[in-house]
Image (tube, rainbow, N blue to C red):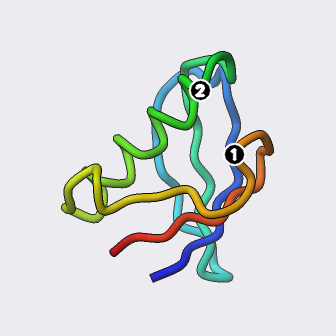
Amino acid sequence: MLIHIKVTPRSSKNEILPQTDGSYKIRLTVPPVDGKANEKIIELLSDYFDVAKSKVMIVRGEGSRNKVVEIF
């Protein structure tokens, strides 16, 4: 499954917000430095979809706020 997400770093809390168009908005407390935000995104999505972290992969947008993530 491919999902589109928009990331907001340095937020007050970590949360995943489903959008009406089928995409997701993710708010993170961590800054986008040294891949920490991407690691947190994978962790949050694996918990949200109840899959292993190894089953979540960022396909596009590793350095962008808009990302495409594949969940196996």
Q: Do the numbered discs 2 and 1 sit on residues whose CB atoms are within 8 Å?
A: yes
Q: Quadrant of the C terminus?
A: bottom left
Q: Label 2: few (<14), some or many (≥20) within 10 Å?
A: few
Q: Which residue is mark 1?
A: 62
Check residue 70 in the rendering and tell me which mark sits there, or answer none: none
Residue under the image location 28 percent in, 50 percent down: 53
Q: Earlier in the sequence, mark 2 or mark 1?
A: 2
- Please say if 21 is above or below 4: below
Amino acid carrying label 2: it is Gly
Residue under the image location 68 percent in, 82 percent down: 21
Q: Is residue 31 left or right of residue 39?
A: right
Q: Dot 1 lies on which element?
A: loop
Q: Which residue is mark 2?
A: 35
In three-dimensional space, the C-alpha distance between marks 2 and 1, rounded to whole angstroms, equals: 8 Å
Q: Nearer the viewer, residue 58 or 37?
A: 58
Q: Quadrant of the N terminus?
A: bottom left
- Please say if 55 is above or below 14: below
Amino acid carrying label 1: it is Glu
Q: Dot 2 lies on which element?
A: loop
Q: Label 1: few (<14), some or many (≥20) within 10 Å?
A: some
- Please say if 50 is above or below 61: below
Residue 57, position as x, y percentages in the image? 47, 58
Q: Quadrant of residue 35?
A: top right
Residue under the image location 70 percent in, 61 percent down: 60
Q: Is residue 57 left or right of residue 43?
A: right
Residue 70, position as x, y percentages in the image? 49, 70
Q: Is residue 1 left or right of residue 37?
A: left
Residue under the image location 57 percent in, 20 percent down: 12
- Please say if 27 is above or below 9: below
